[in-house]
Amino acid sequence: MLDERKRRVLHALTEDYIQTAEPVGSRNLARKYNLGVSPATIRNEMADLEDEGYLHQPHTSAGRIPSDKGYRYYVDELMARWEPSPAERSAVYREVLAVRRAMEEMVHEAARLLARATQYASVVAAPSLEASIFRRLDLVPLDDLRVVAVVVADPGFVQHRIVEVGRPVSQAQCDQMAARLNRRLFGVRYGDIRRDLLAGIKEEVGHPELYDAVADLLTTGLSDRKSDKVYLEGTLNILNQPEFRDIERARSLLALLEARDILNEVLSVAARGGGTTVIIGHENPVAGLRECSVVSSAYRLGDEVIGVIGVLGPTRMDYSRAVGMVEYVADQLTEALDALMRGH
Amino acid sequence: MLDERKRRVLHALTEDYIQTAEPVGSRNLARKYNLGVSPATIRNEMADLEDEGYLHQPHTSAGRIPSDKGYRYYVDELMARWEPSPAERSAVYREVLAVRRAMEEMVHEAARLLARATQYASVVAAPSLEASIFRRLDLVPLDDLRVVAVVVADPGFVQHRIVEVGRPVSQAQCDQMAARLNRRLFGVRYGDIRRDLLAGIKEEVGHPELYDAVADLLTTGLSDRKSDKVYLEGTLNILNQPEFRDIERARSLLALLEARDILNEVLSVAARGGGTTVIIGHENPVAGLRECSVVSSAYRLGDEVIGVIGVLGPTRMDYSRAVGMVEYVADQLTEALDALMRGH
DNA sequence: AGTTAGCACTCTCTCGGGACGAGTGCTAAG
DNA sequence: CTTAGCACTCGTCCCGAGAGAGTGCTAACT
């Protein structure tokens, strides 16, 4: 749709703006990027690009800034693929792959790394359990009416919950219940646990309330009700961005990010895209994030997508680097989880 | 040391400044608080107070501001005791006492509540395990060389750690080890677990590496090495304070707070004080927090102090309210933990 | 017909100066 | 010792002018 010269102008302008955060003028553009034409010509092209909605001016007689549509075009058509340097690769390896601990810790570590590497905020949807393999359940009575249920799954996942049972329960009943469930469920994929798999156990152990509570936990409960966990790291990096020099903006954005369920909404949109997704400005479902962009990529366990990892920054984001970095970290994380699952 | 009228001037001035965040002039002081003397007299008193270091002027011909010494005097000698209103009391009850879940969750909830109630940031040292009662240990092999150790203690405490053992270990060995340890340790106070309590077990189970790893975990490891956990809530409240309208200040403070081990240092100083402690400005061991004050109070399990809960705000803090609120929440938390421990 | 130089114009940003206001310290009288 | 009066100091707000960056238009050039 855009001819070659317009593409080059948009390309140069976008990258200049990403770098400097200042509206870009024709003169500057002509000087820094050898486009082979004079500022006047570039001005004409810029006027056209503005008419078509790719650029806009903050005010007459300022340079131009890419619009969301301009960024979108840049991301889809213009930007070069960025690859992490060897140093960056090895940093990822050292800090994510090498950790080799619980799955959630690895994911969390990846989030921290990503924030540091990109200097944006990183947002990560914690891994869903679906694809994990059930290893063991333990039931430890705390007092008459409350029992700690501990679930261990592979790779390296431990979760516990205190469940309340309506009727007093004994240690022996807990042990019995746990033993039966363990026999039945060992090695089962977590997402495959259904009530019918547990048939008979309710009757075998004389404590239906305990059974119900635990069965509920196993089939639905553990997915961590509280707005499916989201890790958020490097939020302070956002304050370095000139667009958030204004304290009020910064405050309202940070406040928004505190509400994890909102982030979760964003990430679920991102996940729907599959692979790597870029959400630019107004494309964001959350109104308060219309001045931000989110670059995210899914990570997997086996062949299943179990979570999403990404970065959040101003729309004036270094998309090339962000996409490259997010993709690389997501891939490495996937690899690391596989290694963890295979046991070593 | 200060005569009555100076005390009244310092009192009024401090509270006015706390409320308005503006340097306080003699005229204002005379008008708002009926001190029974003219502005001129107050000016003389203020000049004296400044000479003695209780006040200072940001610049000639501005009103006065309390110095750290002034705040200290206010806190120690002048301020009235503040008591939470019935509504606030019941909010504390609803959100902390009523939660009745795991110990750590309760403490975390208390932190959130405190931040909301005071509109400062809350900092809380997570409960130490020392005073908890050992309930159960589980060892679940993840693969040949890694074992998940899950410890359950009362009241409502669950912790897990992945331990690496140098030599392949079987499910049976894990079960055996866990069973023996459980028999030996059930009901033992966590802080009393010592190597000698475990004597003999190492030999009984044919896997010394596993024993060493687990024994290490039980005696020292679980205290959560990573800079003894600190909860931090309501950091954004700080941005509402006019002293942090400047983005650079806000940034550097928030960055400082991210480093949990620094906070831990502050809290450990606070804990040394016992009871309720107020750290004002330059009294803070951390240089970057010299423009902040910290009000904190210990919470207990049984008769033992197991953690510290407090708030952090600008030196121009409503000390009266902060002290009252922190104390009340700490007391209620202590009570709630006791109730949890007694089972019900 | 596209490209470019020239130029008038617009708009923001910065800086200096003057008015204003708040508050002080001093002096002298009560 | 207290207080009224007053001159003085400083920071802040509000202009207005000038500089700088960049544009759009027009007319000439290739």
Image (tube, coloured by chain):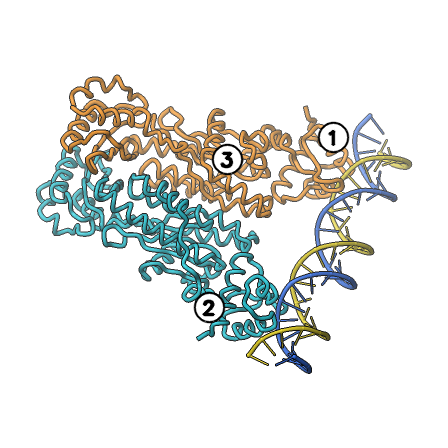
Chain colours: A orange, B cyan, C blue, D yellow
Report the chain holding disc 3. Answer: A
Q: Which quarter of the figure is the N terminus of chain B placed in? A: bottom left
At label 3, the amino acid type is Gly
Q: Which of A279 and B240 is in front in this view?
A: B240
Residue carrying label 1: A48
Q: Position of residue A62 (x, y in %)?
A: 73, 42
In this view, the mark in front (2 or 1): 2
The chain letter for the residue carrying disc 1 is A
State the SS at label 2: helix
Residue in the picture at 35% in, 60% down: B269
Q: Do the residues labelled 1 and 3 touch (CB within 8 Å)?
A: no
Q: Mark 2 lies on which chain?
A: B
Q: Are marks 1 and 3 on the same chain?
A: yes
Whether residue A48 can be seen here: yes
Question: Where in the figure is residue A105, as x and y percent of width and height?
Answer: 35, 39
Neighbour tally class for label 1: few under 14, some 14-19, many 20 plus, Cα within 10 Å: some
Q: Mark 2 points at which residue?
A: B69
Q: Which of marks 1 and 3 is in front?
A: 1
Q: Residue A316: x and y, percent?
A: 59, 39
Relative to A324, A218 lies left or right: left
Where is mark 3, residue-wise?
Answer: A324
Is circle 2 on the same chain as circle 1?
Answer: no
Can residue B146 be seen from the camera position used here? no
For marks 3 and 2, give the CA distance: 54 Å
